[in-house]
Amino acid sequence: MGNEKILQDLSRRKFLRNTAIAAAGTALIPGALSGCKKDRNNTDYQGQGFKEGVASFDPETDRVILWTRYTPASQETQIPELVLDLAKDRDFKSALVSQRVRVDTASDHTVYVDVSGLTSNTHYYYRFRSELTGAVSPIGETRTLPKAGEASQVKLAVVSCANYQSGLFNVYGAVALSEADFVVHLGDYIYEYPAGGYGTNASTTTLNRAHMPEGEIFSLDDYRRRYRQYRSDEQLQLAHQMKPFICVWDDHEIANDAWADGAENHQASEGDFAIRKLHALQAWHEYLPARVADNAKIYRNFEIAGLVNLIMLDTRLAGRNKQLNYADFLGATGLNVAQFLQQWQNPERTILGQEQKAWLSTKLAGSSAKWQVLGSQVLMAKIHFPTELLLIAAQLATGNTDPSLLSQYSLLVTELVTIKTRMLQGDPTLTAAETARVTTVLPYNLDSWDGYPVEREQIFAAAKGKKLISIAGDTHNAWYATLNDVTGNKTGAEFATASVSSPGFEAIFGADAETVTNFEQAHQLLIDDLQYLNAADRGYVLVSFDAQKAEAEWRFVSTLTEKNADTQTKKRISES
């Protein structure tokens, strides 16, 4: 089967999508709500339940997707049928929906219900139950988007990068308890690596967090099992139970550093990448449903309260060209800068693809919302290092923590910080050669928007005159940066979240607080557009929007080895 046919199948794959229309005064379908495990035939059912909890997705002003997964009893031989109850009260005394829905046995026994006819800016409760076996799900909470004028503030919890092997999901627990209205998940919801692979640390075994299945995941069943493992986490279940999610995928839902037609972590010996992608994205839609017409195109937008136009992008798969790699430009005399620049600045290189780029430009032009918010998997800001740091930084990024390399990096950073400080102070003794050392810069991460600079400028131009905010994930670290165009004019700002659990720069430089602090301060000085960096903590960013400002709070948990959802806010900024 050719790649084109495989991708067509992906786009056309139809899930069993139940629908329901809310109507006041709906009578509850009678059923066993007491948790009894026997039907009228006195059968003692075993094994049934809602082991992955409940969740809601893609809220609109009049609708929301409700989700669960049902494990049938060992005695159930027919396709299971459930009852969905939805009400404005937790006791379901006045149900707006009480409707039978089908379990999609072809989609890992997941349930998707798109409920419409809802009231905007309203809180709802819902549950699923089996009349046959008496199983009842946890009670979920969700809400609809406010229309313009119905809310004076919108609060989004932004999360990314949860590695099950790296520790407990305390960040999800914190999000569940937060004042966020909605959760924006920017990808790396799961990781594809095997047990003992990336993310493993000293606590993985004691916490019983090794990946299942044990090997790297490739097949549809592999991806499904990995999602079920992640959704077994009680704090992730709680976050889904308490908040509606708006999600996009990044690379690890498929394979590391993916692009449209391949990935760094996919080799020819591992089969056809298109088939692997087909499996990965089918499982994603089963567990993280999005209201899209084409399963391969998840970019979409949400107009919230007339304040926020949340534009969720696919910077990973929809049209991305393969990333450039500095190693391909190395020669006997070092980096061939001229050759690199020629390819890096190629106007044909794209991270979005032409179709998505045109769609994004239209959405930006047509929105009257105060804030245009790009949900982008990867950093949009320019993170440009002095060129002489790049090769050492690249070696460190691969996990090479050789003490001599770390020492070399530290000494070089110290030299450059001294020069940059003198330059900012207007030191007249500074030589041209010294100035060149800190002003000759190149992008650190070619997997981010930094690898596609021409297209980034096109998006900045499309957003001209708008209040532009980028929210991003991917790096595992927390960033605040200005978005400056090629001429140095500010076009917006970026609030990038730390990871839920995946290791950040501290995995390279160690947990010594002074070392990490020095690293953060040095790079804030050396990187012109960077205003804040937290390189050691796991957490999320709460972004609040009103008519005057966009405010970001970076909140961090203290541990991943013990259950503790308490957070500390270490940075708060606002853009007006």
Image (cartoon, grey):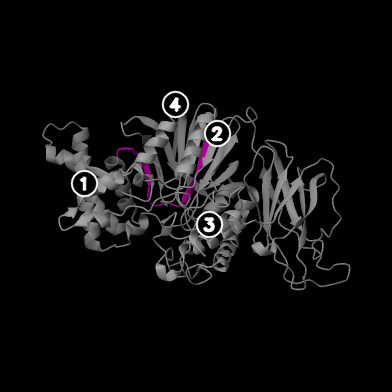
Could you tell me if the residues under marks 2 and 3 are in contact, i.e. CB atoms within 8 Å? no
* Residue on which the image places disc 2: 308
Could you tell me if the residues under marks 2 and 1 are in contact, i.e. CB atoms within 8 Å? no
- Mark pair 2, 1: CA separation: 41 Å
The residue closer to the viewer here, 127 or 204, is: 127
Could you tell me if the residues under marks 1 and 4 are in contact, i.e. CB atoms within 8 Å? no
Left or right of residue 447, residue 62 in this image: right
Identify the mark nearer the N-term, 2 or 4.
2
Q: Which label belongs to residue 338?
A: 1
Q: What crowding class fits label 4: few (fewer than 14 Cα within 10 Å), some (14-19), or many (20 or more)?
A: few
Identify the mark nearer the N-term, 1 or 4.
1
* Mark 2 vs mark 4: in front: 4
**539 within the magenta span:** yes
The residue closer to the viewer here, 546 or 20, is: 20
* Residue on which the image places disc 4: 465
Left or right of residue 330, residue 90 in this image: right
Instruction: Give the x, y percent position of residue 110.
Output: 67, 60
The residue closer to the viewer here, 265 or 59, is: 265
Q: What crowding class fits label 1: few (fewer than 14 Cα within 10 Å), some (14-19), or many (20 or more)?
A: few
Identify the mark nearer the N-term, 2 or 1.
2
Three-letter amino acid code at the position of disc 1 = Ala
Q: What crowding class fits label 3: few (fewer than 14 Cα within 10 Å), some (14-19), or many (20 or more)?
A: some
Q: Which label belongs to residue 7?
A: 3
Residue drawn at the location 34% of the way across and 50% of the way down: 446
| Element at label 1 | helix
The magenta-colored residue range is 528-545
